[in-house]
Amino acid sequence: FMGVLQKLSAVQLALHAPKNQYNSFGKYSYRSCEDILEALKEPLRANNASVIISDTNETVGDRVYVKATASIYDNESGENISVTSFAREDGT
């Protein structure tokens, strides 16, 4: 029996999402969210797990932040782990 932590570890080990996008203005390579989600499909299927990503806008003072949450679910037990992060535009 693999719990959600073991499945998360197995998915992370199997995930390969190269930086196939290029920003010619900043001259750097990057991976998009879509690239990562596409690369996640097979490792998630192989480990009977799912990922759900959501975001909301939150105002703190006069700043608007994007609050993003990513959750991985064990499709067998329903057990899950979530992480949350905030981002905002440059203040200039």
Image (cartoon, rainbow, N blue to C red):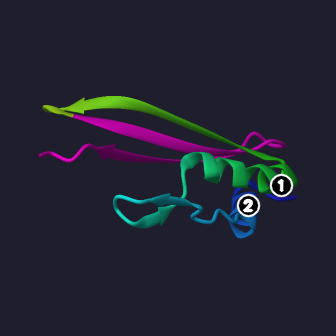
Horizontal arrangement in the rendering, residue 63 relative to residue 9 (left or right):
left
Q: How many labels does the image show?
A: 2
Q: Position of residue 59 (x, y in %)?
A: 24, 30
Q: Work out whether mark 1 precedes mark 2 in sequence or the reverse, and give the earlier one.
A: 2
> Which residue is under mark 1?
47
On the picture, is 56 further left or further right than 18? left
Q: Is mark 2 on a helix, strand or loop?
A: helix
Give the x, y percent position of residue 46. Answer: 86, 55
State the residue position of label 2.
11
Image check: 65 left or right of 42?
left
Which region is colored magenta?
64-92
Residue 90 lies in the magenta-colored region: yes
> Whole-percent x and y of residue 54?
52, 34
Q: Which residue lies furthest to the bottom in this view?
A: 13
Q: Specify the quadrant that holds the N terminus.
A: bottom right
Which amino acid type is shown beneath numbered disc 1?
Asn
Crowd rating for badge 2 (residues with CA inside 10 Å; few <14, some 14–19, many 20+):
many
